[in-house]
Image (cartoon, grey):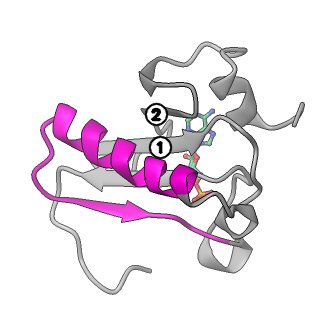
Amino acid sequence: MSDCIFCKIAKGEVNTRLLYRDDKVVAFNDTNPQAPTHILVIPIDHYDSVKEMDDELLIGRLFTVAKEVAGKVGLKHYRLVINTGIGAGQSVFHTHLHVLGGRLMSWPPG
Ligand code: AMP
C-alpha cells in the first residue's frame, strides 16, 4: 500500500535501520519503545492485521524471526505481542509482531 509506513520501511523507501531482512520479513526498532528493547517484526507484503493472513508459513516465520532477533540482541525473557484491531491497541494497520524485553513485565497488560 502506497501510504503505509511499514510498507515503505519494508521496501527501503524510508531511512530505517533494519535489524533483520529476508525475502518475506523485516525487523527494526520501534520509534516509541515501551521497553528497553522494543523491536517490530513485519511481513514485507501488506496485511492490515493478522486477521487478513492465512499463510501459515508466513505467520510462523514472523515468530521464528522474532525468536532469532530476540536471541541476537541478547534477550533471555521477552514478550511477543500482536495487537489486532483498534480495540486491542493496533495503531499501524500493517501486521507487526512486537518483541518487548529488558524489563520486568506485569500481567494482565493494559
Ligand atoms: P500498534 O499500536 O500495535 O499498531 O503498534 C504500532 C507501533 O509502531 C507503535 O509501537 C509505534 O511506536 C510504532 N511505529 C509507528 N511508526 C513507526 C516507524 N516509522 N518506525 C518504527 N516504529 C514505528
Quarter of the displayed picture in which ligand 1 can be seen: top right
Type of the residue with mark 1 = Leu
Residue 107 among those drawn in magenta: no
Relative to 21, say whether 40 is above or below: below
Question: Which quadrant does the N terminus fall into?
Answer: top right
| Residue at 12% from the left image edge and 38% from the top image edge | 74
Task: Say which of 37 and 22 sits in front.
Answer: 22
Picture mark count: 2
Q: Mark 1 and mark 2 in contact (Cβ < 8 Å)? A: yes
Relative to 27, say whether 90 is above or below: below
Q: Which residue is mark 2?
A: 27
Disc 2 crowd rating (10 Å Cα; few below 14, some 14-19, many 20+) is many
Dot label at residue 40: 1
Residue 42 position, x and y percent, is 56, 43
Q: In this view of the protein, can residue 100 be seen by the observer? A: yes
Dot label at residue 4: none
